[in-house]
Image: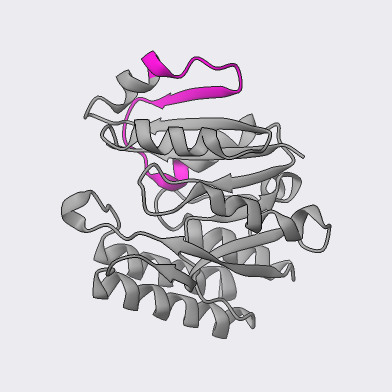
């Protein structure tokens, strides 16, 4: 089984050497697909100079289109059997993929989320990010009848054929509620497993904004009661 790692990047120049070293170190066959989403801090230049392995590729957006757009750009390039989303920050530990993959490798499930709520948090998260995530997860559980503790987690892992079959329209951080809603609408079970979490502050580069929480709520409601695509 080959793992396809999709990494959206926007202005993460300082973190790129470290996160790529951590990703490469995970002992599993993998390909790395990096989408630079219009960075202006030197990220794209660093990637062009340092990504030379044949199992790694860089795609450049000419402007900042959003995380959802970056993920959608990467999906058609996937050649692996399993796909995971990896942010370019240092909030999560790629070694957790090894445990997340097990239910998929055993053939029992198609989707696994790494839950920060179930796992161990190193340091304190900004309270409104934490509360917003809890509320969104509760709304997801109520609307779709499935117990979800961390709908906003970066670590979403899918069988590749399933992810490729989902018609995504997201451009920004609404990728998380949209893909979750469309998986649950198909009556596909999402398994959650604990992961380690090292939260960073807005001053350290965290990009999710307060308004993104409202967009996520609207997205969950839209795909539950409105849009059927």
Q: Which quadrant, please, contains the C terminus?
A: bottom right
Q: Which residues are magenta?
A: 48-69
Q: Residue at x 30, y 57 (%)?
A: 208
Tell me if 170 is positioned left or right of 193 in this view: left
Q: Is residue 73 visible?
A: no
The picture places residue 186, in percent across and down from the top left corner, at: 73, 66
- Total marks in image: 0
Tell me if 200 is positioned left or right of 104 in this view: left
Q: Residue at x 77, y 40 (%)?
A: 1
The picture places residue 163, in percent across and down from the top left corner, at: 67, 49
Tell me if 81 is positioned left or right of 91 in this view: right
Of 97 and 63, nearer the camera is 97
Q: Residue at x 67, y 68 (%)?
A: 190
The picture places residue 39, in percent across and down from the top left corner, at: 28, 31
Q: Is residue 66 visible?
A: yes
Q: Quadrant of residue 109?
A: bottom right
- In this rendering, is residue 129 above or below 84? below
- In this rendering, is residue 27 above or below 149? above
Q: Is residue 51 magenta?
A: yes
């Amino acid at each position: 089984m080959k793992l396809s790692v999709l990494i959206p990047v926007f202005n993460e120049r300082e973190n790129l050497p470290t996160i790529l070293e951590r990703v490469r170190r995970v002992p599993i066959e993998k390909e790395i697909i990096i989408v630079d989403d219009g960075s202006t801090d030197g990220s794209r230049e660093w990637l062009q100079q340092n990504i030379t392995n044949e199992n790694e590729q860089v795609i450049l957006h000419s402007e900042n289109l959003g995380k959802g757009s970056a993920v959608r750009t990467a999906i058609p390039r996937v050649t692996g059997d399993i796909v995971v989303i990896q942010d370019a920050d240092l909030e999560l530990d790629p070694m957790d993929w090894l445990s997340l993959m097990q239910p998929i490798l055993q053939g029992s499930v198609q989707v696994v989320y790494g839950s920060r709520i179930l796992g161990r948090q190193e340091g304190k998260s900004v309270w409104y990010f934490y509360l917003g995530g809890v509320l969104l997860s509760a709304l997801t559980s109520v609307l779709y009848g499935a117990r979800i503790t961390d709908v906003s987690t970066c670590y979403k892992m899918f069988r590749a054929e399933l992810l490729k079959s989902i018609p995504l329209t997201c451009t920004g951080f609404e990728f998380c509620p949209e893909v979750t809603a469309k998986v649950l609408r198909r009556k596909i079970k999402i398994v959650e497993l604990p992961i380690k979490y090292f939260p960073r502050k807005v001053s350290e580069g965290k990009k999710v904004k307060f308004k993104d929480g409202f967009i996520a709520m609207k997205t969950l409601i839209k795909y539950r009661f409105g849009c059927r695509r």
